[in-house]
Image (cartoon, rainbow, N blue to C red):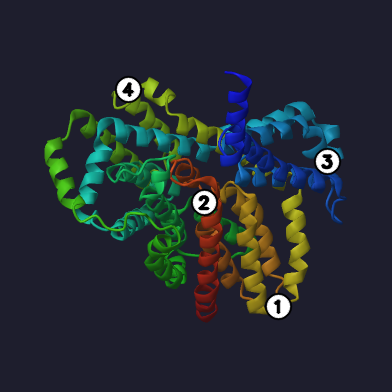
């Protein structure tokens, strides 16, 4: 290529925005924004009452969160880089002077950085991806999806309500929403978009796939709040309420307290997703008949399909009835092992599942990053800062403020269990200081919000990373929708739930 040809191509690239340069500039901007914010925070003095090391850690955490939104590199890589920097700077940002004097900061820092990979929820999420792989490899996912399409496939909105209804039916019996939505619902609906030529990581993802995935994660957040037994941290919350403020909360009391909010959200969530994240394909009248023809062509269940169906029923049975004997993650790992042993998937299939390992690394790094906020004392400092302000308010204003704080602080947590453990006792203690506020009402209000708050981030609850890693929900879309639906869920909870709680009390 001569000089003139090269010059012409460069100029053409500059004019029409093609080539590497615009992409490179976007990456620089996407990296510069979180770095600028993080460096600026680190250079500022810490607020009164917050230790310097805690402030520096908060600067790192904020940098990572903004990086997850701007994505100069893939989200999992942002988390990996963040936790690595945290380990490198551990002696300066993770430990107080007293802790440094009594511990080896080098080994403690790397133990902190890798702690996410011993988290049960992280491995349950990974297992959900392998379950999905089993549905794909055996053809069972295709068969179940065709059954769904043969009855409801003519309209996209009815499919959204069907996804929500499936989650609602399972929710009272499955205390793990990761197992329920990530391990049971997701593997089935993942097959549906392909029938409509809607592909992951492709502009066609908005054809129908994005809508179905968002409806699924939003629905499971609603059902997780609706039943005491629909989310493991709900049960933990009941125990913490009993120990902290000596109030007993029952299953029916929980259900009736959330029912007014739940009915509104269940009726409107698929429709709201349909309006705010509209599928390009609204109706397809020919699909049900086509799906019936495809089912006829598939014939009878194959041996591997039957095997997978047995394993899925085994998992469901143990998740519902066997929680006293086996942890849900143990059940998931057992079924993954049996999938390989029975040949439903091969070990090579598992190793080739890039989305599964990508999500494993991503969530495995976010868990320690979020836990560091409690470890460094930032969470306790913030709660102590706001608590006295709430104590001066009227009962209704204090309760609303308490709920808002508890809900919004979930942006800082990659686990609802961690959020519950770290904040619920603190919030209950603050609630006892608000004159005239029933402690039963405040305990119920805080506990009932645990499920719906999971919608706000791609790491907010167990199944979130599964849907965020599906290829149908780009990172920026997820953050935007999370903020909108989080605001909607919170508004309904405050406008409908709080008045009904105050009335019941």
Q: Residue furthest top?
A: 1
Q: Which residue is mark 4?
A: 341
Helix, strand or loop at disc 4? helix
Indicate the position of residue 212 as horizontal and vertical percent values.
Answer: 37, 52
Q: Residue at x 61, y 58 (%)?
A: 243
Helix, strand or loop for disc 2: helix
Label 2 sits on residue: 477
CB atoms of marks 4 and 3 within 8 Å: no
Quarter location, residue 143: top left
| Cβ atoms at labels 2 and 1 below 8 Å apart | no
Label 3 to label 2, Cα distance in Å? 38 Å
Q: Alpha-carbon distance for marks 2 and 1?
A: 42 Å
Tag 2 or tag 3, which sits nearer the N-term? 3
Of mark 4 and mark 3, the one earlier in the sequence is 3
In the figure, is residue 295 to the left or right of 194?
left
**Disc 3 vs disc 2: which is toward the camera?**
2
Would you name the residue on which mark 1 appears?
A: 435
């Amino acid at each position: 290529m001569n000089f003139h040809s090269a010059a012409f191509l460069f100029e053409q690239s500059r004019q029409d925005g093609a080539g590497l340069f615009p992409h490179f500039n976007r990456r620089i901007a996407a990296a510069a924004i979180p770095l600028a914010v993080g460096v600026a925070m680190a250079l500022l003095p810490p607020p009164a009452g917050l230790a310097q090391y805690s402030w520096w850690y908060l600067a790192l955490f904020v940098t990572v969160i903004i990086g997850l939104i701007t994505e100069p590199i893939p989200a999992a890589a942002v988390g990996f880089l963040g936790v690595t920097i945290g380990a490198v700077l551990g002696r300066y940002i993770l430990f107080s002077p007293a802790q440094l004097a009594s511990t080896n900061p080098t080994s403690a820092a790397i133990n902190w950085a890798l702690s996410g990979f011993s988290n049960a929820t992280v491995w349950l999420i990974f297992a959900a991806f392998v379950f999905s792989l089993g549905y794909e490899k055996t053809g069972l996912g295709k068969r179940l999806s065709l059954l769904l399409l043969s009855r409801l496939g003519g309209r996209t909105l009815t499919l959204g309500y069907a996804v929500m209804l499936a989650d609602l039916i399972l929710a009272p019996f499955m205390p793990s929403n990761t197992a329920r939505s990530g391990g049971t619902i997701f593997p089935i609906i993942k097959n549906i978009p392909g029938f409509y030529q809607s592909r992951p990581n492709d502009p066609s993802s908005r054809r129908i796939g994005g809508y179905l995935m968002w409806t699924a994660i939003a629905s499971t957040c609603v059902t997780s709040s609706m039943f005491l037994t629909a989310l493991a941290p709900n049960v933990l919350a009941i125990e913490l309420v009993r120990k902290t403020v000596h109030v007993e909360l029952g299953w029916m009391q929980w259900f009736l307290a959330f029912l007014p909010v739940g009915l509104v959200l269940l009726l409107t969530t698929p429709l709201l997703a349909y309006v705010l994240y509209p599928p390009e394909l609204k109706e397809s009248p020919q699909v049900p008949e086509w799906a019936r023809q495809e089912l006829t062509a598939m014939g009878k269940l194959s041996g591997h399909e039957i095997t997978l169906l047995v394993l899925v029923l085994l998992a469901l049975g143990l998740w519902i009835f066997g929680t006293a004997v086996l942890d849900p993650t143990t059940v998931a790992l057992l079924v993954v092992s049996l999938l390989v042993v029975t040949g439903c998937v091969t070990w090579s299939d598992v190793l080739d599942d890039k989305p599964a390992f990508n999500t494993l690394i991503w969530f495995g790094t976010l868990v320690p990053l979020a836990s560091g906020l409690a470890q460094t004392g930032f969470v306790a400092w913030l709660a102590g800062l706001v608590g006295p302000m709430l104590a001066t308010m009227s009962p209704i204003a204090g309760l609303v403020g308490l709920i808002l704080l508890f809900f919004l602080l979930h942006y800082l947590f990659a686990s609802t269990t961690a959020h519950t453990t770290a904040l619920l006792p603190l919030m209950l203690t603050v609630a006892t200081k608000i004159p005239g506020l029933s402690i039963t009402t405040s305990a119920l209000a805080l506990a009932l919000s645990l499920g719906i708050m999971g919608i706000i981030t791609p790491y907010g609850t167990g199944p979130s990373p599964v849907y965020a890693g599906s290829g149908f929900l780009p990172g920026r879309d997820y953050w935007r929708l999370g903020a909108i639906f989080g605001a909607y869920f919170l508004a309904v909870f405050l406008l409908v739930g709080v008045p009904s709680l105050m009335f019941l009390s």
